[in-house]
Amino acid sequence: MTPALFNPDNEQKVIPTLAMLTAGVIEPRVAAVIAGVHEEALYKAMAMPEVQAAVDVEITRLRLSGELATVFMKQYPGVTVEVQGGGSGIGVSATKSGACDIGALSRELTSTETGFTEYTFAKDGVAVIVNKSVNISGLTVEQIQKIFTGETKNWKEVGGIDKPIVVVAREAGSGTRGAFNELTKVLDSAKVDQTTVNAIVQPSTGAVLQTVENTPNSIGYISLGSLQNTVKALTINGVECTEANVINKTYKISRPFLYITKDKETLATETFLNWVMSVEAQKIVSRDFISVLSK
């Protein structure tokens, strides 16, 4: 039997079916499968009986897409939104092959990733932070790349005091680490992570924040939404890490969160994507990231 969606108030069919990743997903419900979700955008409500969240990446935080899906499903109880992990590349390939309805990326599409309709539903800046003992106020992207690859080892090499630099990084698989490395070219042209082996590796934003706060001469990176005054955020190429500068694209270590689709969207997929851009959904986005409604 073909699944259908129902309006809970009058039990009339209101939305046609979505393509499912696997057959027989919780009939008569349908699944809007979102693949390729990074650490900041993975599924939070895995205990819900109608939701099957198959997560195949290392997870440290389960946030944005899951929170959006949870609220959406409460308003549209005929729809099950199934969120799967795997990274932005998986989101692209799964959408292209038709294995999912929506792909999620925490980066721009590349020049070779064509044929998709894209929706920017959130933005994020990655703040470069230092311990307050560090007597510099800013760095260039090139200087950051040399620090995090271990080429630059002392603060005096970038105009600071004669002290060794303590590098603090996120764990492999972190979406924040992936975005930071790509944007600062710590990820080299062969897509190899060149983060120095001497880095202190931490499994969460909170751990990075605390380590930099308590470790003299240290430097790390966190999502802008988690920035606190217990550390110092550096300017990058002379530009402060602020919401306004992320929006106007002058702050260079920033990224969009995209949903992508291919071919004609079903009404159910269109309904979800339209809702994600609503004021209600964007309030969820703005808890930790930057709403696309921000000016």
Image (tube, rainbow, N blue to C red):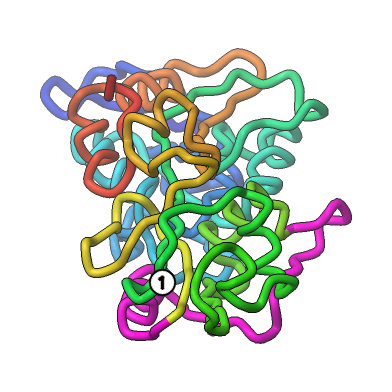
Q: Residues within 10 Å of mark 1 (few under 14, many from 20)?
A: some
Answer whether residue 270 is visible to the viewer in this image: yes
Tell me the quarter of the picture where residue 131 sits.
bottom left
Q: Eyeballing the image, is 122 above or below 215?
A: above
Q: Residue at x 52, y 71 (%)?
A: 170
Front residue (pair 221, 175): 221
Q: Is residue 177 left or right of residue 286?
A: right
Q: Is residue 92 left or right of residue 221?
A: right
Q: Residue at x 71, y 75 (%)?
A: 150
Position of residue 191 measured from the top left corner of the image (x, y, whole percent): 81, 56
Front residue (pair 169, 274): 169
Position of residue 80 measured from the top left corner of the image (x, y, whole percent): 37, 42
Answer whether residue 22 is visible to the viewer in this image: no
Q: Secondary structure at mark 1?
A: loop
| Magenta stretch contains residue 237 | no
The boundaries of the magenta stretch are 187-216
| Amino acid type, callout 1 | Val
Q: Residue at x 54, y 41 (%)?
A: 237
| Magenta stretch contains residue 215 | yes
Tell me the quarter of the picture where residue 137 sits.
bottom left
Counting every numbered tag in the picture gives 1
Position of residue 158 measured from the top left corner of the image (x, y, whole percent): 59, 63
Q: Eyeballing the image, is 215 above or below 40?
A: below
Residue that protrudes farthest toward the right in the picture:
190
Label 1, on which residue? 134
Q: Is residue 108 left or right of residue 73?
A: right
Q: Residue at x 38, y 68 (%)?
A: 205
Residue that protrudes farthest toward the left in the picture:
9
Front residue (pair 16, 95): 95
